[in-house]
Amino acid sequence: MTHLTTLMGIGILGGAFIVGWGPLGCASAPVSRSDIAGSIAWHATTFQRVPTTVQDRPAEQYTFTLRLREHTGMGITWTRVTQTVAAAHVQPLTVSQDGQWRLPPQGELQLPFRLVWSCPTLSEACSTAAGPPRWHILLIGTTDDGHSVQLGLEVDAPTGDAVVVSR
């Protein structure tokens, strides 16, 4: 059985990472990288996949920026960001981070994400066996008038070499 190792974090949070090993699993069909959810438009942008190594094995570092834009004039303070990352044949891994991220009324917030993905039992990159990773991101916070809000997003890494950055 192939075991995959994943390190992930939200870049703005000073490198909060977890490491996980898991048996084979599955992921569902691809989804878009932008949408409008209620009063918030979002877009995952600046995707990059950089070949790297982890413990002398091939790995990949994925980075992207999640851009949120508020459209109704009601600001939101996000207090928890939870991300779950999965791919075909990979058991999902979840990490949460508490903090304060302000989305101003009719303004924009940018949240950078980072994933270092290694498959220690493979002699090739993880995406060769599992395809690109998928993020489920859950943001929890409070509006300026004190109402609790949650925003769930599904983000797929682009397929192919379009986002590869050589080292």
Image: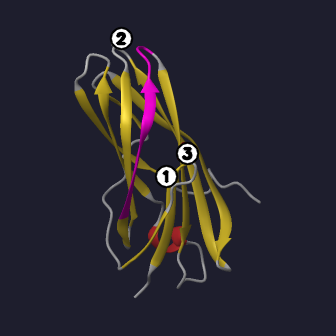
Disc number placed over residue 73 in the picture, else none: 2
Where the N terminus falls, by quadrant? bottom left
Percent position (x, y) of residue 167?
A: 77, 60
Which numbered mark, 2 or 3, is in the foreground of this view?
2
* Element on which disc 2 rests: loop
* Element on which disc 1 rests: loop
Mark 1 and mark 3 in contact (Cβ < 8 Å)? yes
Which numbered mark, 3 or 1, is in the foreground of this view?
3
* Residue that label 1 marks: 157
| In-front residue for pair 87/14 | 14
Please name the residue shown 53% across and 71% down the image. Answer: 126
Please name the residue shown 46% across and 34% down the image. Answer: 43
Report the span colored magenta: 93-106
Is residue 95 highlighted in magenta? yes
* Residue that label 3 marks: 64
Where on the picture, by quarter, is residue 68? top left
